[in-house]
Image (cartoon, grey):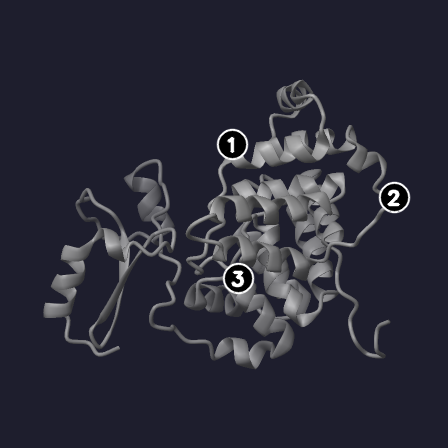
Amino acid sequence: MCRKGSVMPTPFKALAELCEKLEATNKRLLMISLVADFLRGLGNDEVEPAVSMILGRAFPKWSQRTLDVSWATLSNIIKRITKVDWKVFGEAFDKTGDIGSATKILFENSKIGKQATLFERVLTITEVRRGFEAIAETVGSGSREKKERLMEALLSSASPVEAKYLVKIFIGEMRTGFHEGLMEQAVSKAFQIPLKTVQKASMSVGDVGEVAYIAKTRGKESLSKIEFKVFRPVKLMLAQMANDVKEALREHGGKTAFEHKLDGARVQIHKRDGEVRIFSRRLTDVTRSLPEIVELVRRNVKAEE
């Protein structure tokens, strides 16, 4: 029973069906409207998980948690659950060229797909996020077997279309054509906040899902006050391609600056007191891989925060 004024948990199937619609169109304005409508109908605590999942991520972009799931492990679980001849998967993959779509076909041909209406258990967005968290937190001795059990529990509760998008999130390959820039526009449209405000906030906190949550719960004023947080990686400014110098000059209004391109990795370095962390352009924590840089920063960068 749902109390008056409360929001019913959103089924993961609703998110999966939204992703099906996104995959079926290349009309950007339609995509933005579909996602904006979906975001407006979510409960507050569902917003960030839903945004992450629509973009093919289990967690916020800045989070260092990973599912660490191999295709070998995932395929074995799918085989166990569906009990369908694996040739069916091969044929489906050859036809669709997509692991998630092939999984959907496999589930449709299994007893799970055929009995879904008889034994339907609603899998919610919140449950899926909790499942991902449990998988990511499973480490140490016996972790592989425990991860497999957790993944199997999620997939066993899934309908064919839900299985398709669970698999896509597991492997980090959504392929709906709906990217982060469009999500920022959807957040802007959903909560009636200027796009520039959304984009600036997204760059500052490093995750459009958190921006969507703040937009829904606290509105434009709070979003416009968002500031950079130490140890929370921000999105890097990336160079845009130009065909030639003339095009670059034209794009910059006739004046621009040129510099030699040096080989190396683009990183961002955060420091507070003696603690230093280094993040890659993909916002991955690579501190342990660069101990000599950490030491150089500790010795030579005087900023406290």
Amino acid at dot 3: Val
Local crowd size for mark 3, using a 10 Å CA cut-off: few (<14), some (14–19), many (≥20): many
The reply to whether discs 1 and 3 touch (Cβ–Cβ < 8 Å) is: no
* C-alpha separation, residue under disc 1 versus residue under disc 2: 30 Å
- Residue 117: numbered disc: 2
Name the residue beneath numbered marker 3: 208
Name the residue at the right extreme. 118
Q: Where is residue 180 in the image (x, y as percent from the top left)?
A: 53, 53
- The quadrant in which residue 27 appears is top right
Q: Nearer the viewer, mark 2 or mark 3?
A: 2
Name the residue beneath numbered marker 1: 72
Q: Is residue 226 left or right of residue 25?
A: left
Is any part of residue 88 visible from this angle?
yes
Residue at (71, 32) in percent of width and height: 82
Is any part of residue 177 visible from this angle?
no
Local crowd size for mark 1, using a 10 Å CA cut-off: few (<14), some (14–19), many (≥20): few
Amino acid at dot 1: Ala
Element type where label 2 sits in the image: loop
* C-alpha separation, residue under disc 1 versus residue under disc 3: 31 Å
Question: How many numbered discs sit on the rendered protein?
Answer: 3
Residue at (67, 44) in percent of width and height: 155
The reply to whether discs 1 and 2 touch (Cβ–Cβ < 8 Å) is: no
The reply to whether discs 2 and 3 touch (Cβ–Cβ < 8 Å) is: no
Name the residue at the front extreme. 141
